[in-house]
Amino acid sequence: MLKQLILAGVFMLCLSYTETVYSQHYMSEDDVPILVRNSFYENYSGNYDIDKDVRWINDYGNTFTAEYHKDGLINRITYDENGSIARTETQIEVSALPYIIRDNFIVEYPNVKIYYTGVVDDVLNGTLYRLGYSPADASQDSPRTYIYYRGDGTTYIWK
């Protein structure tokens, strides 16, 4: 009986942790600092046709990302808590990656499926290319991994 109670407790703890991990980053627009919201809506939403609603993500507690779709592609703008842009990211087609990045990726990861490619312009790190991938035989719900490359084809460890 005690063993069953312990297992049930561990199961509930794992379930709670999983729910927290997957839901902790998305936030209500009302919870986004007003300086951040104003910066986004003054500088971006009026200038672009946004296909879908904006989703807000709280990154690491002190940066906030507006994620939206434009022309069917994902776009992200990350702000610091004062409303200054820290980085932007725009989804691109795999064919738009520099050849050296595509070639290096294929050599390093021959048995994976690329499901996302984007270009990141970061205030501190410059231009980076972000690739999302998973094992080629993975299901749609499988965990996915991201890797960053510099324009010269070298990998970059995000700090």
Image (tube, rainbow, N blue to C red):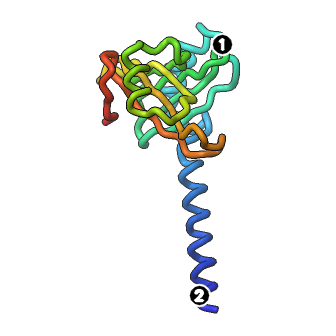
**What whole-number distance in Å separates the C-alpha atoms at marks 1 and 2?**
54 Å
Quarter of the N terminus within the rendering: bottom right
Describe the element under mark 2 as helix, strand or loop: helix
Q: Quadrant of residue 130?
A: top left
Task: Inspect the image, locate mark 2, and give the three-letter code of the amino acid beneath it.
Answer: Lys
Q: Is residue 2 above or below residue 113?
A: below
**Residue at 67%, 17% in the rendered image:** 72
- Look at the image and tell me whether residue 85 can be seen: no
Q: Nearer the viewer, residue 64 or 21?
A: 21
| Relative image position of residue 100 (x, y in whole percent) | 37, 16
| Relative image position of residue 38 (x, y in whole percent) | 53, 21
Does residue 54 appear left or right of residue 102 in this picture? right
Q: Is residue 116 above or below residue 24?
A: above
Q: Dot 2, how many residues are within 10 Å of its Cα: few (below 14), some (14-19), or many (20+)?
A: few
Task: Inspect the image, locate mark 1, and give the three-letter code of the amino acid beneath it.
Answer: Asp
Q: Dot 1, how many residues are within 10 Å of its Cα: few (below 14), some (14-19), or many (20+)?
A: few
Q: Nearer the viewer, residue 84 or 26?
A: 26
Q: Nearer the viewer, residue 80 or 76?
A: 76
- Look at the image and tell me whether residue 6 can be seen: yes
Q: Of tags 1 and 2, which is closer to the observer?
A: 2
Q: Residue furthest right?
A: 52
Quarter of the C terminus within the rendering: top left
Q: Residue furthest bottom?
A: 1
Q: How many marks?
A: 2
**Residue at 61%, 63% in the rendered image:** 15
| Marked residue nearer the N-terminal end (1 or 2) | 2
Q: Quadrant of residue 120?
A: top left
**Residue at 30%, 24% in the rendered image:** 154
Q: Which mark is residue 108?
A: none
**Residue at 62%, 70% in the rendered image:** 12
Q: Give the labeled residue for mark 1.
A: 71
Q: Give the labeled residue for mark 2.
A: 3
